[in-house]
Image: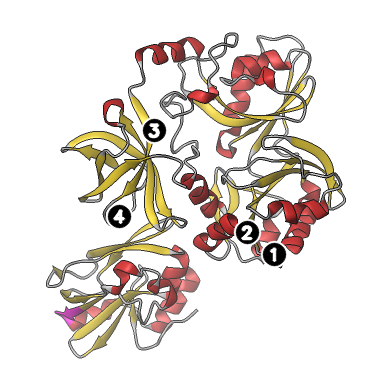
Amino acid sequence: MSIPNDLFYTENHEWISMDGKEAVVGITEHAQEELGDIVFVELPSVEEELDQFEEFGVIESVKAVSDVFMPAGGIVVEVNEELMDQPELINEDPYGSGWLIKIEVKDKDELEKLMDSNEYESFLEEE
Amino acid sequence: MNKTALFDEHQNLGAKMIDFGGWQMPVQYSSIIEEHKAVRNKAGLFDVSHMGEILITGKNSLSLVQRLMTNDVSKLTKGEVIYTPMCYEDGGIVDDLLVYRTEVDEYLLVVNASNTTKDLRWVKKNAELFEEVEVQDKSDYYSLIALQGPISREIIQPLVEKDISDLKYYNFLESEIAGVKAIVSRTGYTGELGYEIYLEDDDAVTVWNALMEEGSDKGLKPAGLGARDTLRLEKALCLYGNDIDETTNPLEAGLSWTVKFDKDDFNGKSELEKIKENGVQRKLVGFIMKERGIPRHGYDIKIDNEVVGEVTSGSYSPTLDENIGLAYIDKDKALEDTELDICIRKREVKAKIIETPFI
């Protein structure tokens, strides 16, 4: 199970990578595996402002509907349009081409509420 | 939680297991879409041992079965199978099932796993009206493996003692398979050529592995309940608990062909006759999404802002690469090409009624 060590993780299995003020958000390898074949993605509009842990979209696999939540509050600056036609990218490359949105994080301190890769790994073992 | 005799095989194959009607069943092995396509193009192997089996024997077994079922079971000869709803007096559906005529005075009912207890109670209650008839729960006795797909005959024939090349749809025979006793039935829930194999629990692993070995070079894949659901939906086959239940009747569910008013009295006959005379209130129809969105069980359906129905089943269709569903729609609106608005979360998403089966 791949858990990159430069990302932060939520208990709902989203990841966030910080690079300056901008951050990329996606779901983890574990999350995509649990969902199975992903066939539909609904994402917010650019410029939408959302709070930490607020729902920002929906991912549907053949069998399941699953909400996704903001790892940190901020403004959406870009959404992954490729996913509209190729939602399976989330299965194939959840930490790369299967990213969901890019956000401008408002308060970096919120990241302290998230898990680092070690903590997420233990969290998965307990779950 | 019940486990089938094949539980360890599923674990070894890396299946993801779910609770289904009190049973631990494989929902998928690799990917629902891959398994679905394997069944449409080659073949898939399903463990459906969770299905319930009820054996009815005795001189009056046919009379009891005829009272219980809406379809005409008297037409069956030994070796034939029939699909039928079983109704309450009010016309609501207790279950939908297969009836096998295994002997002159012996019928095997194959029922939905989650309904087995309820069905058994209902069958036994009706049996009190008849002398010389016995009802037995055989669910723990049988394992059931379904081999489905266009190449399933090639895979199964080398293992079956008897020649099955002439075995017709909805017919079965008793034969050895991989050296063990079995009932081989040309039935299934995928709309493809296929066989369902009834075995004693102790023989299930032998036959499962023999079929996997015979088929793996030819493209056979193990397939789970996830693919079973998308496969049946593309063929618009009803799923009990989704599309039909105690609050629906066979006439509105598009199952009129299984209700034989010209046979003697049966449970629900007079109510169903009334419904037929007055016309159904709603109809089960198929629809396809015209905008992005996946319909799911329970979503409301509107036309001109008015609720006209509800989704009963919906999914991505791997064969069509489209999103499809089944829904009950008010009778006046249940016409082909009618545009629908499916209420998906906070949005209304366009769909259109189309002819079924979808493929």
> In this image, B270 relative to B118: left or right?
left
Chain for disc number 1: B
Residues tagged 2 and 4 counted as in contact (Cβ below 8 A): no
Q: Tell me: residue A56, above or below residue B6.
A: below
Chain for disc number 3: B
**Residue B27 in view here:** no
Q: Residue B351 location, x and y as percent?
A: 28, 46
Judging by the rendered image, the residue that carries numbered circle 2 is B42
Judging by the rendered image, the residue that carries numbered circle 4 is B293
Q: Nearest to the eye among marks 3 and 2: give it.
A: 2
Same chain, marks 1 and 4?
yes
Residues tagged 3 and 2 counted as in contact (Cβ below 8 A): no
Front position in the image: B148 or B3: B148
User: What secondary structure is found at the residue carrying circle 2?
Assistant: loop
Q: Which residues are magenta?
A: A103-107
Residue at figure coordinates x 26%, y 38% from the top left: B338
Same chain, marks 2 and 4?
yes
Chain for disc number 2: B
Marker disc for residue B218:
1
Residue at figure coordinates x 80%, y 21% from the top left: B104
Same chain, marks 2 and 1?
yes
**Mark 2 or 4, nearer chain start:** 2
Q: Amino acid at mark 3?
A: Leu
> Magenta: predominant secondary structure element?
strand
**Mark 1 or 4, nearer chain start:** 1
Judging by the rendered image, the residue that carries numbered circle 3 is B284
Front position in the image: B327 or A3: B327
Q: Residue B77 location, x and y as percent?
A: 75, 24
Q: Nearest to the eye among marks 2 and 4: give it.
A: 2
**How far apart are labels 1 and 3 at the CA level?**
38 Å
> In this image, B77 relative to B302: left or right?
right
Q: Nearest to the eye among marks 1 and 4: give it.
A: 1
